[in-house]
């Protein structure tokens, strides 16, 4: 499988695995503002014809990537999608965050700081892999 699958960088470094950032598609803000994102993504995918999976970091980017595939039939239509957050695209799995727990954890840490405690910590909130079917 070739494509972008995102894990925390330190996990890769701990395993001695180097990240190939040439598979990361960063869309510049000026492209987003001009509504040129779908064609920008399509151009990126044409340069990476062997890609078999796309992992989008937001529902918005998933929808724009999906749009690129809809508009350009020359792209590999067998590419699988996974999204971070629900893109509401049929048969597209996504990572569902527990936003309430994330907010509670953030408030707890802020309240500790307001009370004079400064104890930096990493709080991990479990996520779930979901599928959205229309």
Image (spheres, rainbow, N blue to C red):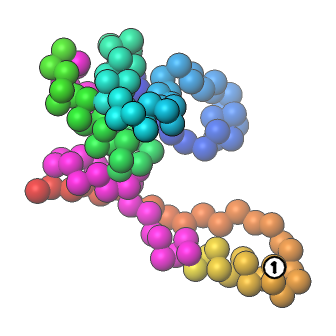
Q: Nearer the viewer, residue 72 or 116?
A: 72
22 with respect to 113 (left or right)? left
Residue 54 visible at all: no
SS class, disc 1: helix
- In this rendering, would 101 be left or right of 82? right
In the image, farthest residue toward the front: 34
Residue found 73% across the figure and 78% down from its top: 110
Q: Position of residue 45 (x, y in %)?
A: 35, 20
Which residue has dot 1 on it?
113
- Can you say whether 130 is above or below 125 in the image? above
* Front one among 88 and 30: 30
Side of 77 relative to 125 (left or right) = left
Q: Residue 46's image quarter?
A: top left
Residue 71 place in picture, x, y as percent: 18, 26
Does 107 appear above or below 122? below
Say if 15 sits above or below 112 in the image: above
Q: Say if the magenta span includes residue 89.
A: yes
* Crowding at mark 1 (Cα within 10 Å: few <14, some 14-19, many 20+): few
Q: Quadrant of residue 125?
A: bottom right
* Of residues 85 and 122, the one drawn nearer to the viewer in this rendering: 85
Q: Which residues are magenta?
A: 75-103
Q: Where's residue 67, x and y in %?
A: 23, 35
């Amino acid at each position: 499988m070739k494509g972008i699958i995102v894990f925390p960088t330190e996990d890769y470094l701990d395993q001695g695995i180097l990240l190939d950032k040439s598979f990361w598609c960063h869309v510049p803000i000026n492209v987003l503002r001009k509504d040129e994102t779908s064609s920008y993504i399509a151009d990126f995918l044409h340069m990476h014809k062997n890609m078999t999976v796309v992992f989008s970091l937001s529902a918005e980017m998933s929808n724009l990537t999906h749009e690129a595939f809809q508009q350009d039939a020359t792209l590999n239509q067998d590419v699988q999608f996974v999204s971070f957050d629900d893109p509401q695209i049929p048969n597209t799995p996504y990572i569902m965050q527990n936003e309430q727990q994330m907010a509670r954890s953030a408030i707890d840490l802020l309240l500790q700081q307001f009370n004079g405690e400064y104890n930096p910590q990493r709080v991990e909130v479990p996520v779930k892999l979901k599928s959205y079917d229309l």
